[in-house]
Amino acid sequence: MPVVTERLTAVMAAGLDELVADDHRIRLPTQAARRWDIPGHGQIALSRWGLPVDQLLVPGFQSETHPILVPNVAGENERRVIAPHQRLYVIGRWGRHESAAKIGAVAGDGRVLALWDSPLAVDDVHPDLAEHYRDLYRPAVEFVNSSVAQFVECCWRWRAAVEVLVADLEAYDPTWPTEAALAHCDLHESGKQIVMDQFRQIDPGIDGPATIWGETVLDELV
């Protein structure tokens, strides 16, 4: 059986049509997609491939034809990403809990951003943890992908990668000798790096581990 790095390399090289699961996706109808003011390749990606429904992302396309998502441009960090007057089309949520970020596509340029109701700072954490998070600040708006088409591709490749990574974790045997266990862990980490490297090729805007995709892949969030 191929090792995890070989399997992930194959997943990253596969055509997108090979990775899409018909029974685990939701698509934006073609006519609805055409009414969104985003670049054409993003419209095509949402209507042709859609988004997986069984991962961290919870897809939920808005029914309105105009962008309805309003960003909280709370400060300079948010202004680096979006202007107060800009609006977004709702794509879904990044997680299933109530405080999960909303995911939207910016009207016009089609960038995909994550939006929270407000920034997260040290004052928002429990007092007992404040000492450990003195420099905490998460803006209310964060970059996800440079385009909807890139976002769609990353979502499907991540879904396929998760299946490989989970199988690899399940294959771990606690009775292995230390050397074999460490080698297994090293390969697993190398596999995640293969995914990140491919994501940066898909979208050079994903510039490091402190991004939404960086945190998702390196922490194996599903």
Image (cartoon, rainbow, N blue to C red):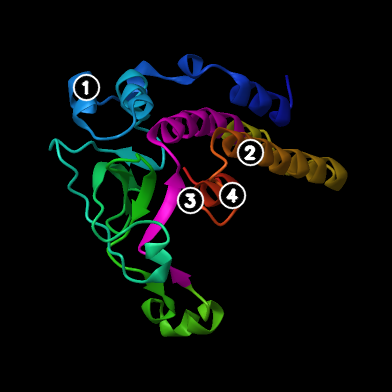
| Magenta residues, start to end | 137-165
Circle 4 crowding by C-alpha within 10 Å: few under 14, some 14–19, many from 20: few
Q: Helix, strand, or loop for circle 3?
A: helix
Q: How far apart are marks 3 and 4 (CA)?
A: 10 Å
Q: In this view, does 95 lie above or below 34?
A: below
Q: Where is residue 11 in the image (x, y as percent from the top left)?
A: 60, 23
Residue marked by disc 4: 207
Q: In this view, does 143 lie above or below 17?
A: below
N-term mark: 1 or 4 = 1
Closer mark to the observer between disc 4 and disc 2 = 4
Quadrant (top left/top right/bottom left/bottom right) for the N terminus: top right
Kind of residue at disc 3 = Ile
Tags 3 and 2 touching, CB below 8 Å: no
Kind of residue at disc 4 = Asp
Out of 64 and 185, give the one closest to the viewer.
Answer: 64
Kind of residue at disc 1 = Pro
Residue marked by disc 2: 169
N-term mark: 3 or 4 = 4
Residue at coordinates 19% horizontally, 44% vertically from top-left? 67
Kind of residue at disc 2 = Leu
Residue marked by disc 3: 212
Closer mark to the observer between disc 3 and disc 4 = 4
N-term mark: 3 or 1 = 1
N-term mark: 2 or 1 = 1
Closer mark to the observer between disc 3 and disc 2 = 3
